[in-house]
Amino acid sequence: MATYKNSCGVFVLQMMVVALLCLHAQGQGLKIGFYDKSCPHAEKIVSKVIDEVMAVAPSLSGPLLRLHFHDCFIRGCDGSILLDTPTGQTEKFAPPNLSLRGFNIIDRVKLALEKACPGVVSCADIVALVARDVTVATKGPFWEVETGRRDGKLSIITDLRNPGLPPFNANITTLKQSFALRGLNTKDLVVLSGGHTIGTSHCSSFESRLYNFTGKGDTDPTMDQNYIARLKLKCKPKDQTTLAELDPGSFKTFDDSYFKLVTKRRGLLQSDAALLDDPETRSYLVQATSHGSTFFKDFGVSMVKMGRIGVLTGSQGEIRKVCSKTN
Ligand code: HEM
Ligand SMILES: *[C@@H]1O[C@H](CO)[C@@H](O)[C@H](O)[C@H]1NC(C)=O
Ligand SMILES: *[C@@H]1O[C@H](CO)[C@@H](O)[C@H](O)[C@H]1NC(C)=O
Ligand SMILES: *[C@@H]1O[C@H](CO)[C@@H](O)[C@H](O)[C@H]1NC(C)=O
C-alpha cells in the first residue's frame, strides 16, 4: 500500500478512505446570502413554508433537523439523502434511515422556490436552511446559514455503512472518530448531540438497554433505573413502531434540558450516554446547563461547520429541479 497525498491534502494509506477524507469540512465556495441576487427572497420563502408546516405538524421538526445531519454525514451535504431511484438502492432506503421523515416537506419548499426562481436554489441548501428554520421554530437559536451548495448526482445505499453514520449504540471512541473523519471535533460532537433536545426515537433504537444489554437479559447499568422502569412501560421487547421522546418533558422545545438528562444518566440512546465517558464532553454537559451556557451560540457554529462537509460548489454537481431526482 502506497502512502500519497490526495487533493484534500491528507496523507492516506488506502485508496478506500480517500473519498471519506474528502468529506472533511472545507466549505470553500459557500457564503452567507449566496442567493441575494439570484433569488432574493429564497430564505424568506423557505421560512414561510416551514412556519406553515410547523403550525400544523410540529412533530416534523425533529425529522427535518435530523435530515441535514444524515445528508452531511453521507457523501457530504449534497442533497443525496433525498434521491429516489427506480431500484430504490439509495441512501434513503438503507436501514439506518429507519425514521427519516419529512421528505415531502422538502419537496414543498422546493416547489415554492421553483415557482419564484426556477433552477436556482439547490436541494442541499434547502435541507440546510430548513434545519435552521425548524430549530428557530422550536425556540432554539438562529444562525446565518451558508449557502451555495450544489446537488450531487449519486446516492448509494452502501454509503450508509461505509463509512456510515455512527450507530445508536456507538461508544465515545467511535463517536469521536466518526466526527473527526468529517473534520468535526469533540466539542462539535457534544454540541450537535444537543439536537436530541427535540424529536423522538423508535423503541428499537434503545431496546437492548432495557432488556438485553449484554445478551444475558440484563439492563444497561449506566442508565438510571427509574428511567428504565418507565421506558419499559412504553417499550415492550421487539416493538418496532412506538416512539419515545428523546428529551422527555420538552421534546418539542429546543432547550438545554437534554444535557441535564444526560448528566442524570437519562440519555435515551447509548450514544447520548457515551458523552459522560470523556472529560471534554462531560464537562460540556455541565457547562451547557449552567448559567453561562454557550449552547445556543455553539449550536449555530457547529451546524455551520457540519454544513460544510464534502460540499459541491461552483460548477460541480447540479441544481436539481426535483429534489428526489437528478435532472
Ligand atoms: C452523535 C451521533 C448521533 C447518533 C448516534 C444519533 C442517533 C439517532 C437515533 C438512533 C435517533 C432515533 C431514530 C429512531 O429510532 O427513530 C436519532 C434521532 C434524532 N437525531 Fe440523532 N444521532 C446523532 C447525532 C445527531 C445530530 C448531529 C443531529 C442534528 C444536529 C441529530 C438530530 C436528531 C433528531 C432531531 C432526532 C429526532 C428525529 C425524529 O424526531 O424523528 N442527531 N438520532
Ligand atoms: C427507509 O428504508 C426502508 C427500507 O429499509 C424503506 O422501505 C423506506 O421506505 C425508507 N424510508 C423512507 C422515508 O424513504
Ligand atoms: C468502541 O466500539 C468499537 C466498535 O464497536 C470497538 O471496536 C471498541 O473496542 C469500543 N471501545 C471501547 C473503549 O469500548
Ligand atoms: C438476548 O441476546 C442474546 C444474545 O444476543 C440472545 O441469544 C437472546 O435470545 C436474547 N434474548 C432475548 C429475550 O431477546
Image (cartoon, rainbow, N blue to C red):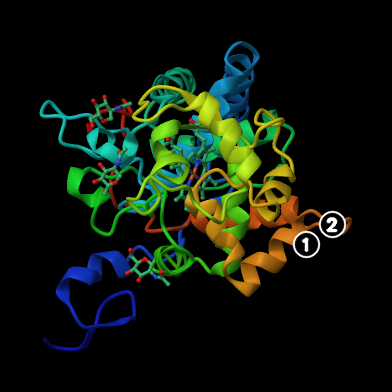
Mark 2 neighbour class, 10 Å CA radius: few under 14, some 14 to 19, many 20 or more:
few
Q: Is residue 85 left or right of residue 134?
A: left
Disc 2 to disc 1, how far (Cα)?
A: 5 Å
Q: Amino acid at mark 2?
A: Ser
The quadrant in which residue 79 appears is: top left
Q: Amino acid at mark 1?
A: Gln
Q: For the residue labelled by badge 1, is the local secondary structure a helix, a strand or a loop?
A: helix
Mark 1 neighbour class, 10 Å CA radius: few under 14, some 14 to 19, many 20 or more:
some
Q: Can residue 53 be seen here?
A: yes
Ligand 1 has an atom within 8 Å of the beta carbon of the residue at disc 2: no
**Residue at position x 17%, y 69% in the image:** 16
Quarter of the rendered structure image containing ligand 3: bottom left
Q: Is residue 68 above or below residue 169?
A: above
**Where does the image place residue 244, in percent across and percent down from the top left?**
53, 29
**Where does the image place residue 173, in percent across and percent down from the top left?**
44, 70
Q: Nearer the viewer, residue 65 or 189?
A: 189
Q: Are marks 2 and 1 in contact (CB under 8 Å)?
A: yes
Q: Residue furthest right?
A: 291
Q: For the residue labelled by badge 2, is the local secondary structure a helix, a strand or a loop?
A: loop
Q: Which residue is mark 1?
A: 287
Q: Can residue 312 be seen here?
A: no
**Residue at position x 58%, y 24% in the image:** 45
Q: Which residue is mark 2?
A: 290
**Residue at position x 61%, y 45% in the image:** 225
Q: Nearer the viewer, residue 44 or 180?
A: 180
Q: Nearer the viewer, residue 250 or 219?
A: 219
Quadrant location of the N terminus in the rendered image: bottom left
**Where does the image place residue 224, in percent across and percent down from the top left?**
63, 48
Q: Is residue 66 left or right of residue 94?
A: right
Q: Nearer the viewer, residue 161 or 8?
A: 161
Ligand 1 has an atom within 8 Å of the beta carbon of the residue at disc 1: no
**Where does the image place residue 112, in percent across and percent down from the top left?**
48, 18
